[in-house]
């Protein structure tokens, strides 16, 4: 029987099971920002470094064009906040800024961010003490997701249970044997306020008042007293006093933007949400997609079905030369299942699940049946991802691998501190791997 998580947060975001059955080593992540370093890995294998690790900057040739690529190191800031800061400081529309992927907030991270309509000379050496510019090149196009392979993580886990040190090898060996589940990690949903998927669900259901109330009024245990008081005022409909209590910081930009609209028009919930950047609204909807994916992946693991092998009726994607999924998808039948599994072993294919959208068509089979059951239990169907009131939030749907094999570079245990360096393909979360090692009962504490 698969090992079930005892953490309420795991269940709240759909990560109901572990793939490994070894005991956890405990410990805490992110006691200091430097304990969690995330460096982007480009599609050609070059690393976009932080100033901490001392790696060389990637070699990128200048090309004449309307874009500037900035190598940015940020500390303790999420990517959406970074987007807002760059937009304001550079005087350009947020839609003229692009990046390859979201990066952790409670961490030191590096990534390439591109901006249109500025020159190299417009870029300062920093955008405040927590955002450094390590390099700048001119470019003829935007930097996008397909430009990156993934991320390299340099992690320190403090205060592990040394008496369980044997669990480290046990977990890592089982992950290589069984595959690391491609759950969406805590950052996707929030640790202190794990509700982005709940807001997203209300949006696709057309329940905009409920979406606004979840954003503004639902207080979570890890929040400071002042913020909890402000949320209580929102619940009472006192938007003006709540706005006075919410700090004027980028962290609370969403709350302030929506509250300002509600002060003027207390029942205009759709337009209140429209005050938020499209990227953030889209993140809410995609977070609900992620939650549905997590639930389906959990159910597959819970049923004892493999995630690193295809079964008749499954769907698989072929992988490119970099080991990343292509758009070539196969519906596996009994006659081809052995050949498909040979491709999976060789790293040329991977079983996949749906990221549900309005274009999703579920096929009969183990994964399709599980996904259909998840949708029924949630009371949603793919057509609801066509958001008529805010059409730009509609999502077509897509696929995601059910497992990956992490690239473990180094593992060192010094006293009660575990240092690890590893790489994961884009779209995957270091905290999902660390979750298997630590097996925390309170990740909202141990991962912040």
Image (tube, helix red, strand yellow):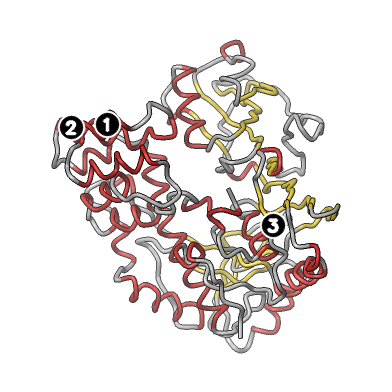
State left or right for residue 263 relative to residue 36: left
Quadrant in which residue 291 is drawn: bottom left
Which residue appears at 45% of the width and 28% of the height? Answer: 84
Residue sitting at the far bottom: 334
State left or right for residue 312 relative to residue 166: left
Residue 148 at what x, y percent from top left? Answer: 65, 44
The residue at which mark 3 appears reads as 27
Closer to us: 380 or 157: 157
CB within 8 Å, label 1 to label 2: yes
Mark 1 neighbour density, 10 Å: few (under 14) some (14–19) many (20 or more)? many
Q: Mark 1 to mark 3: distance in Å? A: 38 Å
Name the disc covering residue 86, or none.
Answer: none
State left or right for residue 319 relative to residue 87: right
Give the secondary structure at mark 1: helix
* Residue 294 appears in the rendering: yes
Which residue appears at 38% of the width and 62% of the height? Answer: 359
* Residue 354 appears in the rendering: no
The residue at which mark 2 appears reads as 263
Residue 411 at what x, y percent from top left? Answer: 83, 55
Q: Mark 1 to mark 2: distance in Å? A: 9 Å
The answer to which of marks 3 and 2 sits earlier in the sequence is 3
Give the secondary structure at mark 2: helix
Residue 383 at what x, y percent from top left? Answer: 30, 64
Decide: is 147 above or below 97: below
Quadrant in which residue 430 is drawn: bottom right
The residue at which mark 1 appears reads as 243
């Amino acid at each position: 029987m698969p090992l079930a998580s005892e953490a309420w947060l795991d269940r709240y975001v759909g990560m109901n099971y572990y793939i490994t059955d070894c005991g956890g080593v405990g410990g805490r992540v992110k006691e200091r920002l430097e304990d969690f370093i995330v460096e982007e890995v480009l599609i050609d294998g070059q690393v976009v470094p932080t100033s901490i690790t001392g790696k060389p900057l990637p070699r990128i040739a200048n090309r004449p064009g309307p874009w500037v690529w900035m190598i940015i190191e940020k500390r303790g800031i999420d990517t959406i906040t970074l987007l807002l800061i760059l937009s304001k400081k550079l005087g350009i529309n947020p839609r003229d800024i692009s990046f390859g992927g979201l990066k952790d907030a409670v961490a030191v991270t590096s990534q390439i961010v591109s901006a249109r309509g500025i020159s190299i000379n417009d870029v300062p050496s920093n955008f405040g003490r927590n955002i450094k510019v390590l390099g700048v090149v001119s470019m003829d196009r935007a930097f996008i997701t397909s430009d990156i392979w993934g991320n390299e993580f340099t992690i320190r886990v403090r205060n592990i249970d040394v008496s369980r040190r044997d669990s480290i090898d046990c977990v890592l060996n089982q992950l290589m044997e069984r595959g690391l589940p491609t759950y969406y990690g805590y950052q996707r949903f929030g640790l202190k306020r794990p509700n982005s998927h709940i807001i997203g669900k209300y949006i696709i259901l057309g329940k905009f008042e409920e979406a606004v109330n979840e954003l503004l009024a639902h207080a979570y245990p890890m929040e400071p007293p002042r913020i909890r008081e402000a949320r209580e005022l929102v619940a009472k409909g006192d938007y003006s006093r709540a706005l006075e209590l919410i700090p004027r910081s980028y962290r609370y930009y969403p709350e302030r933007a929506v509250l300002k609209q509600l002060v003027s028009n207390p029942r205009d919930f759709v337009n209140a949400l429209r005050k938020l950047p499209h990227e953030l609204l889209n993140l809410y909807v995609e977070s609900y997609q992620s939650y549905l994916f997590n639930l389906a992946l959990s159910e597959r693991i819970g049923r004892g079905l493999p995630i690193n092998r295809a079964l008749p009726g499954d769907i698989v994607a072929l992988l490119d030369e970099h080991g990343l999924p292509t758009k070539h998808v196969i519906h596996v039948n009994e006659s081809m299942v052995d050949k498909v599994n040979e491709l999976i072993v060789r790293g040329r294919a991977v079983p996949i699940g749906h990221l549900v959208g309005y274009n999703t068509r579920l096929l009969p089979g183990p994964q399709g049946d599980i996904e259909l059951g998840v949708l029924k239990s949630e009371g949603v169907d793919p057509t609801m991802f066509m958001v008529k009131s805010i059409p730009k939030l509609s999502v077509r749907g897509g696929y995601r691998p059910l497992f990956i094999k992490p690239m473990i570079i180094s593992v060192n245990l010094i006293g009660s501190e575990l240092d690890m360096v590893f790489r994961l393909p884009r779209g995957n979360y270091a905290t999902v791997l660390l979750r298997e090692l630590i097996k925390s009962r309170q990740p909202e504490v141990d991962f912040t």
